Image: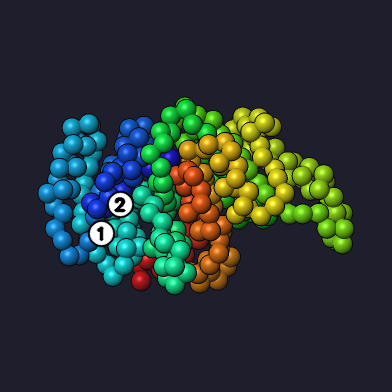
Amino acid sequence: MQAIRCILVVIDPRLSENLALKRARLIASVSQSHLHLLVCDGKHDHGQYLANLRTELEGQGHAVATHQAWHDSLHQTIIAVQQAEGCGLVIKQHVADNPLKRALLTPDDWKLLRYCPCPVLMVKTEAPWTGGKVLAAVDVGNADIEHRTLHASIVNHGHEIASLAEGSLHVISAHPSAMLSAADPTFQLKETIEARYRAACKQFQADFDIPDSHLHIEEGPADALIPRVCHELKAVVTVIGTVARTGFSGALMGNTAEVILDVLESDVLVLKPDDMIDHLETLARR
């Protein structure tokens, strides 16, 4: 997080409070990042509103630029500006769609998580990060190089946020139920499955000084366990990743990050592996 030079902050003038801007100020105060404020609207002029925000932020010592644009859709507008300005992080306040609309149309925030070629922080609460708990969600059952690299990035970002907020880092990984018919004897008993998952976490526990009490290895589906543990911990941020295989088409229907976005009671930082980012950047340039 501290290496990010420019943060794209999506501003919605219709909202009563700029929660995304609140988080951006916190991160920028530590990273000295440039703040690029964006209003996505092609119909109304928000120039004075943005100018007032810029004056306020510059008075607080931040480097700020403002932008109003519209490119066919919300997520396409955000991505176009992110690419043009070279922003390393997008911060947006998440407003959940109603269930009927979500059943008929893919939510804009889901599309942003799918297609944005850089990390996206969805801000959901007013809760201060200071002194809070950060939950990093990893799937250590997948041990290929793509997943291991993503796991390291997830835990590293969680550690940086916890350090920034002077809080604590917790890690969760959900494991499958035992199956007596499994070809691998490890997956025939719950105890041996859990032992394998804990062993897979030893390296980043050592790298980031994560005690066993902050490691949550539990049986069940990730989209149910992550929100439950987040609630129990009263976590302020959940860090999660999404992986695409070779030949990724752009559609990630049902991935965990999307499924849990509305139910998590914390802010959500979504990361992607490098090869997926490269692919999305290629799509964005077309």
State the colouring used for the structure image.
Answer: rainbow
Task: Say which element carries label 2.
Answer: strand
Marks 2 and 1, how far apart at CA: 8 Å
Q: Where is residue 194 in the image (x, y as percent from the top left)?
A: 77, 44
Task: Say which element carries label 1.
Answer: strand
Question: Which residue is at 14% across, 58% downward?
Answer: 45
Q: Position of residue 30 (x, y in %)?
A: 36, 32
Residue 40, label in figure: 1
From the viewer's perspective, is 251 left or right of 13?
right
Three-letter code for the amino acid on which mark 1 is drawn: Cys
> Does the image show residue 188?
yes
Question: Which residue is at 59% across, 38% downward?
Answer: 232
> Does the image show residue 38?
no
| Marks 2 and 1, the one that precedes in the sequence | 2
From the viewer's perspective, is 184 left or right of 154?
right
Please identify the quarter of the rendering in which residue 118 is found.
bottom left
Please identify the quarter of the rendering in which residue 78 is found.
bottom left
Q: How many labels does the image show?
A: 2
Q: Nearer the viewer, residue 112 or 146?
A: 112
Q: Would you say the residues marked 2 and 1 are in contact, meaning their CB atoms lie under 8 Å apart?
A: yes
User: What residue would you read off at disc 2?
Assistant: 10
Label 2 neighbourhood size at 10 Å, few (<14), some (14-19), many (20+)? many
Q: Which part of the image, by quadrant, shows the C terminus?
A: bottom left
Q: Where is residue 38 in the image (x, y as percent from the top left)?
A: 25, 53
Question: Which residue is at 30% across, 52% downward?
Answer: 10
Residue 256 drawn above or below residue 284: above
Three-letter code for the amino acid on which mark 2 is drawn: Val
Question: Which residue is at 40% across, 46% downward?
Answer: 123
Residue 101 drawn above or below residue 55: below
Label 1 neighbourhood size at 10 Å, few (<14), some (14-19), many (20+)? many
